[in-house]
Amino acid sequence: MKLSTKEKSRLKEKYGEWAIVTGASSGIGLELATQLADAGFNLIIHGRNLEKLKEVEMQLSANSNIAIKLVAADVSEQEGVEKIIQISQGVNIGLLIVSAGYGTSGNFIESSLHTEINMLKVNCEALLSLTHFFSQQFVSQKRGGIVLMSSMVAFQGVPYSANYAATKAYVQTLAEGLAIELKPFGVDVLAAAPGPVKSGFSQRANMQMSMSLKPSEVGVPILKALGRKTTVLPGLLTKILVYSLRTLPRWAKVKVMEKVMGGMTAHQRQ
Ligand SMILES: NC(=O)c1ccc[n+]([C@@H]2O[C@H](COP(=O)([O-])OP(=O)(O)OC[C@H]3O[C@@H](n4cnc5c(N)ncnc54)[C@H](OP(=O)(O)O)[C@@H]3O)[C@@H](O)[C@H]2O)c1
């Protein structure tokens, strides 16, 4: 999937010249960075691994004539977040995409508390710090866009991935509130809430996904929704999964998710 010429111009006019994409070394972040490069945005691309970022830089430079800065930083640590902020100094940033994140799954009582807290820091604390810093900057320049990666698991509790779903509920709720609060200042905030997407995610989360979207099926819908919606459910599979649950009371949605996530994590309990 590609952005139309009209859509590329809209994004550039509203949010150009530079975008920051965290988690750009893989999956959804990589797809968003690729689409933005194609639209002519200069990019600050972030991930933990510098070698992977250099490969992404080569890939992006081969197809577009844009400036690219790399920042390798673990955002579970405050210094990692500071590194991203530092590299953005003096750069005309108009777009922040926070895609760095990961999931966990399995029986909660058998999980590592260290890992669960680390995930909370990456998915919520780092996202909050970056959103806070760049919202202030965007409000003062009276324009900007912020995309926060939520998930379809954000809309109800999810047995066997309870803490991951809770981190995404935080992201979803934060984005919904900020979208209204920052709109009068010319700043657009979007919660992107995909269903399963084939990326590095499932391996790290130890989930077995039977159906999934490709990152190329979610990137364009996310960028098209920015400035037009508060929440996007990118891809047909996401819409089918979320809408099929929508009429159920919340307790029943949790029961359905018990079955769904139970299947995705069954291998861990054999
Ligand atoms: N895939 C799905 O099914 C799905 C569905 C809904 C929502 N999401 C959300 O979408 C976002 C992107 O996930 P994805 O599917 O693209 O997964 P992915 O392919 O695993 O990419 C995750 C990205 O986050 C970075 N990252 C992870 N931990 C980090 C840390 N401590 N510090 C800095 N960077 C870190 C990774 O960098 P390295 O490569 O250096 O590790 C990578 O660039 C996540 O927030 C995820 O929760 C994913």
Image: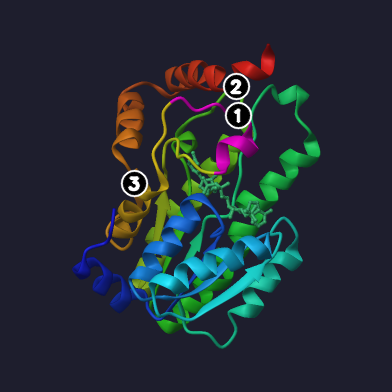
Residue that label 2 marks = 265
Alpha carbon distance from label 1 to label 3? 24 Å
Identify residue type, mark 1. Answer: Ser
Q: Residue furthest left?
A: 6
- Earlier-in-chain disc, 1 versus 3: 1
Say which quarter of the image contains residue 18: bottom left
Residue in front for this viewpoint, 193 or 237 = 237
Taking the image as shown, residue 3 lies to the left or right of residue 270, namely left
Element under disc 2? loop
Quadrant containing the C terminus is top right
Q: Which mark is residue 161?
A: 1
Seen as rendered, the residue at the extreme bottom is 90
SS at mark 3 in the image: helix
Residue type beneath disc 2:
Thr
| Mark 2 Cβ and ligand 1 under 8 Å apart | no
- Mark in the foreground, 1 or 3: 3
| Residue 237 position within the rendered picture, expressed as x and y whole percent measured from the top left | 33, 33
Task: Please give the residue where the numbered disc 3 appears in the rendered image.
Answer: 217
Does 202 lie within the magenta span? yes
Asked if residue 54 shows in the view, the reply is: yes
Can you say whether 62 is above or below 264 in the image? below
- Whether residue 18 sits left or right of residue 202 in the image: it is left
Q: Marks 1 and 2: CB-CB under 8 Å?
A: yes
Residue 119 numbered tag: none
